[in-house]
Image (cartoon, rainbow, N blue to C red):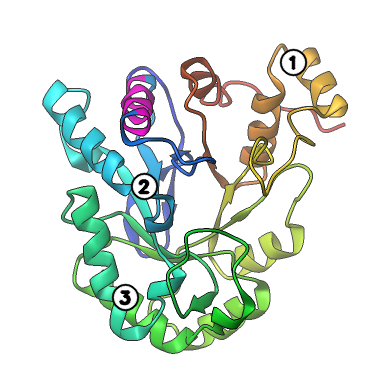
Amino acid sequence: MDGVGIATLSLSGCEKPMPVIGMGTCSYPPADFETAKAAILEAMKAGYRHFDTAFAYGSEKPLGEAIAEALRLGLIQSRDELFITTKLWASFADPAQIVPACRMSLQNLQLEYVDMYLIHQPVRLTEMISRTPVAAEIIRPLDVKGVWEGMEECKNLGLTKGIGISNFSCKMMEELLSIAKIPPAINQVEMNPVWQQKQLREFCKARGVHITAYSPLGANNTKWGDNRIVESDVLADIAKANGKTTAQVALRWAYEQGVSIVTKSYNKERMRENLQIFDWALSAR
């Protein structure tokens, strides 16, 4: 992996191991096509092989172009070297629309399959949206059984190797697990040293559902995140004592909780630093 030893893990119902660090492609404000494509290619050079996208991010097409370019350049020898996650947007969370939505994402990505397909939000929206917050009148409860059957169909058709969920609470997971023929491999949720998700982690661990942490650095410089992690004095002191960056300490903390991580940086140096978390450990105190 380009000299970078990124740990991998096995997932329930998914034959390919998943690298425990993925590069996120959700940026705010959204990056233009060429900026996103260039950053993804840079990430491949740095050693990233797991890329996390979604229809809602608008980053499927630049990721698809970057993969095609990486193959042309010889950065990767085969698409099979990559682990690609994308997500069903809430406007398509209707049983009849799930397989077509997955096919549309595959077309955007120029791929025959993705490695992981997630339900992005545990709700359905009755129309497309271009901004948040979302008006309450277009939010509907999710038809968990009908939507999950559509996700299972995506897997059975070979459109995705694994299926999972995102932003699901323990209660919603109980409902899903009671009807699922194929249980979700992953629940991707916000998690970091400030928002530790202990109850949800214990719930998922007991049921064999792996947690992937997004916003492990607190989504600083976005309208939904803040700087409590990147400017934390406690984390800064730990970082100084270990000769690391605050971001590396936050990412290492997440890794030591047994979760995988999706972290986004389009800065060449930081994206490399974010991978350097495997050859040291945090002390228990």
Query: Looking at the rendering, which quadrant does residue 107 occupy?
Result: bottom left
Question: How far across and how far down the image is residue 147, in percent?
Answer: 40, 82
- Magenta residues, as a range? 35-45
Tag on residue 257? none
Q: Is residue 11 above or below residue 77?
A: below
Q: Earlier in the sequence, mark 3 or mark 1?
A: 3
**Mark 2 in CB contact with mark 1 (< 8 angstroms):** no
In the image, is 271 to the left or to the right of 18? right
Crowd around label 3: few <14 · some 14–19 · many ≥20 (10 Å):
many
Tell me residue 102's x, y (percent).
27, 66
Q: Determine whether the residue tagged by mark 1 lies in a helix, strand or loop.
A: helix
Say which label, 2 or 1, has the lower sequence index.
2
Asked where in the image residue 185 lies, by quadrant, the reply is bottom left
- 258 relative position to 74: left or right: right
Within 10 Å of disc 2 (Cα), the crowding (few <14, some 14-19, many 20+) is few
Label 2 element class: strand
What's the residue type where badge 2 is placed? Answer: Pro
Q: Residues within 10 Å of mark 1 (few under 14, many from 20)?
A: some
Identify the image quadrant of the N terminus: top left
Q: Based on the displayed image, in which of its 4 quarters is residue 222 positioned?
A: top right
Asked whether residue 36 is drawn in magenta, I would say: yes
Three-letter amino acid code at the position of disc 1: Asn
Residue under label 3: 98
Q: Give the answer, above or below, for where 227 lies relative to 215.
A: above
Q: Which residue is mark 2?
A: 17
Mark 1 lies on residue: 242
Q: Residue at x 42, y 57 (%)?
A: 56
